[in-house]
Image: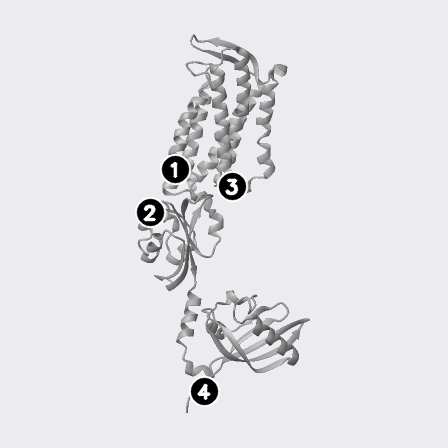
Amino acid sequence: MAGAIPLLGMLITVTVWTVTYALELSSATFEWQYFWLRMEYFGIPYVSPFFLIFALEYTQQTKAVDRKWLHAVWIVPIASTVLAWTNQAHGLIWSQIGQTNYGTFIVLHLQHGFFFWVMAAYSYLMLLSGSLVLLRRVIKSWSTFKFQPLVMIGGVLVTWAGNLLYLSGSSPIPELDWTPMSVILSGIIYTIGLLRFGVLDILPIAGESVLESMDDVVFVLNDQNYVVFVNRVFEYYTGVDPKTLFGQHAEQALAPWPELQSLAGLDSTVRSEISLNLKNHGAVYFDVKISSIRWKTDRSFGRVIRLDDITERHNAEHRWRTQDEAEAGTEIPMIVVFDIDQEQIIEVNRSFLLHLGMERNQVMRRSLLDLGIWDPYQRAEFRKRLFQENRLERYGLQLTNSRGLAKDYSATAHLMESGGRRYVVILAQKETVPQPA
C-alpha cells in the first residue's frame, strides 16, 4: 500500500518514544531515568522524517524528489541519537540534567543544549513539509476522499501539539513531556481514519498517473461500492467530468447508464461485452473486464472495471456475418504483405480485416501463426512450396477467423526481395462451392 512502510516506521518510533518515556517516569533512580532518557532518542528524532516520507509516498511524489535528498533526511536524526548517548562529553543535547520531586513522582529537569534546538527545528521543518504535501492533496481531492490526508495531518498535529506545549514551557508541570500522552489521542484519530475514511484506501494504490495514461475507460470502486477513481477517457465518451462521480455510490453515480450500473453490482471477476448508446458517438461496444483488488490475503479491497472500445471490430464481424455468400466470387480479395524472414505482417487491406473479424492494430507486426490464422503444418508447407517455386497460383489455404471458424481460400502468392529483405504478397478469395445443376 502507498505509504504503508513509512507510516509503520512513524508509528514504531512514536511507540518507542512513548514506552521509554513511561519507563523514565516510573524509574526511581537518576541512573535509570537518564538511561531511558537516552533510549527515547531511538524514537524522537525519527518521527518527523518518517512522516515526510509517508506524505510523499502517499501522494505519489517520491519521483519528484531526488533520491539522495530522501537519504539525507536521516543525517540529523542519526546525529541526534549519537550525541544523546555521548552527551556527557559535550553537552550538546542537554547542558544540565537534574531531578525535580513532585511528591508522588520524580521527573528529570533538563536544560537543553544547542543541538537539541537544531533537532527540534529540523523536526518541525519536516513536519511542516509533510503537512504541506498532504494539504496539496486535500486541495486536489474531491468529495469524501479529502478526509484521508486530513486525518493524517490531524493525527500528527495532535502529537506535535503536545510536544510544543512541553518545549514552550506552557505546561502546568514544565518538566513533564505531554507528547507521549497526545499519542493516545493520535491513535484514536488514526483508527477512525482507517475504519471510517479509508486511510491507505485504494485511491493511492490505483496509481492515478498510470490509469490516466490508459486508452480504456477505467473505474475503481472500493469495497463498499463507492467510486474512488474514473479516468479522463470516460469524459471523451460521455461528456461528463469524471471527478463529479468521485465519492458517490456506484448505483447513484452510474444511474444515467443502466448497463454500467449493472456492472457495478457484480462482485466476482468477470469478462463480457456491453453496448452503450452515447449521445456524441452513437452505439459503442465495449469489452468489459472486472477484476478484484486483493492484498496478500483473500480480502477484497475493491474492484477495477475496464472498458475497451471494440466498436470497430464488432462492426467488422457484423458485416462479415451478414455478407452474402452468393457474391463470394466477385468480392474484393484479401491482401496481406508480410516479411517472410521475420514473420511480421506489414500491410493488409480492409477485406482481410472484414473476413477475419480483426482490427488493424491487432494484426500489424504480428505473424499469421501468432494470430491463429493458420496452423504450423500449413505454414511449413506454404513456405516449402513458395521457396521452391517463388510464385503460387490457386494454392489452397484454410484460414481461421477471430471466432475460430475455418474457411477454405484460393490464394496467389508472390515472393519478392527489396533492400535485402524478402517479402510475400498473398491475394486470397474464398473457394466457391459449385451449385447443383
* Label 1 SS: helix
Name the residue that disc number 2 marks. Answer: 249
Name the residue that disc number 3 marks. Answer: 61
Instruction: Please identify the quarter of the rendering in which residue 427 is found.
Output: bottom right
Mark 1 to mark 2 CA distance (whole Å)? 17 Å
Label 1 vs label 2, nearer the camera: 2
| Precedes in sequence: disc 2 or disc 4 | 2
Where residue 125 sits: x, y (%)?
Answer: 52, 29
| Precedes in sequence: disc 4 or disc 3 | 3
Mark 3 to mark 2 CA distance (whole Å)? 29 Å
Q: Residues within 10 Å of mark 2 (few under 14, many from 20)?
A: some
Q: Amino acid at mark 3?
A: Gln
Name the residue that disc number 4 marks. Answer: 434
Q: Amino acid at mark 4?
A: Pro
Mark carried by residue 95: none
Name the residue that disc number 1 marks. Answer: 147
Label 2 vs label 4, nearer the camera: 4
Mark 3 to mark 1 CA distance (whole Å)? 19 Å
Label 4 vs label 3, nearer the camera: 4
